[in-house]
Structure formats: C-alpha cells, structure tokens
Image: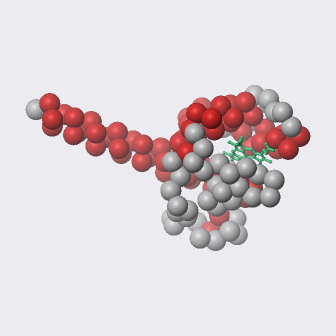
Amino acid sequence: MKIFLLLVVGFFSLFATDMQYNKGEMLYFSKSCNSCHGPSAEGGSGTPRLSHKKQNYLKSRLYYFRKGKVSSQQQEVMVQFTLKLSDAEIEALSYFLSYHKKSDTQGVSSELLGGFGS
Ligand code: HEC
C-alpha cells in the first residue's frame, strides 16, 4: 500500500514539475525574453546565457531586477521586463531556464518566436 502511495505521489510531482516547465517556456516566449536571450536561452550579443544556470541564482536575479536593483547600465533593461512578473511566473521561468532541454520550440507559435523560427 505504501509503495502504491509513493508511486501516486511520484507521478503527480513529475506531472507538476512538467507543468512548471511548460509554463516557464510559454512565459519565456510570450514575454519576449527570447528576443534578447535567444530561442534556446543561449545568450547573445550583450545578453548572458540563462539556460542551465542554478534556479535559485536566476530567481534571485529576477527578484532583484523587479525591485529595480541593478549594478550596471546594461542591466537596466531587465527592470521593465520583470516589473510585471508575479512570484509564480518568476518561479516558472527560473525552473524552465535552469532545467532547459535542447531548444524545444515545437508547439510555440512562430509569432511568439519573433522571427527566430524553430
Ligand atoms: C531587451 C533585451 C532583453 C530582454 C527582452 C530580456 N532580457 Fe534578460 N537581460 C538582458 C541584459 C542586457 C541583461 C544583463 C547583462 C549584464 O548583466 O551585463 C540581462 C540579464 C538577465 C538575467 C541575469 C543573468 C545572469 O547571469 O546574471 C536574467 C535571469 C534574465 N536577464 C532573464 C530574463 C527573462 C526571464 C526575460 C523575459 C521576462 C528577459 N531576461 C528579457 C536583456 C534582456
């Protein structure tokens, strides 16, 4: 009976983290993060790579930006992109970025990809 319960709990937690990942992925594209950080969060000219960084690190960066705390002029742009993010959205975004799988843009409309294509 205990094993059965463990399996059920395990199944639902897998499901929950999967939902978190998908939510983060949708946010990443719908909030235009991809236009600067790249479709695979690999970073680009003047923007850092975000994929596979520690979730707690990304989360704290986003909280700081949302509070308007920046340490360089380049970072100021991030304030406007984080101002309207809720705690839950920051959680999902940082989860998605930290556990980023190889660019999976299937199912994301080309409109959201902003010309980067799949
Ligand atoms: C207009 C371009 C632009 C957009 C859009 C943008 N960013 Fe950024 N982002 C930057 C720049 C520039 C930096 C800071 C570079 C530096 O520190 O010199 C940055 C830094 C970050 C960092 C800190 C990374 C680190 O290693 O310290 C995170 C996390 C981040 N962005 C997440 C996001 C998320 C999530 C979104 C979408 C909600 C987003 N960014 C949208 C340009 C952008």
Residue at 28% x, 43% y: name it. 11
Residue found farthest to the left = 1
Q: Is residue 41 left or right of residue 7?
A: right
Q: Is residue 8 left or right of residue 81?
A: left
Q: Quadrant of the C terminus?
A: bottom right
Name the quadrant containing residue 94.
top right
The spot of residue 31 in percent (x, y) is 67, 50
The spot of residue 10 in percent (x, y) is 28, 39
Residue at 74% x, 43% y: name it. 81
Relative height, residue 45 to residue 31 (above, below): below
Relative height, residue 111 to residue 90 (above, below): below
The spot of residue 21 in percent (x, y) is 49, 48
Residue found farthest to the right = 73
Residue at 51% x, 48% y: name it. 99
- Residues 41 and 20: in front is 41
The spot of residue 86 in percent (x, y) is 62, 34
Q: Is residue 67 left or right of residue 27?
A: right
Relative height, residue 107 to residue 27 (above, below): below
Name the quadrant containing residue 116.
bottom right
Residue 64: tell me if it is visible.
Answer: yes
Q: By what rule are the colours in the image chosen?
A: secondary structure
Residue 33: tell me if it is visible.
Answer: no
Q: Quadrant of the N terminus?
A: top left
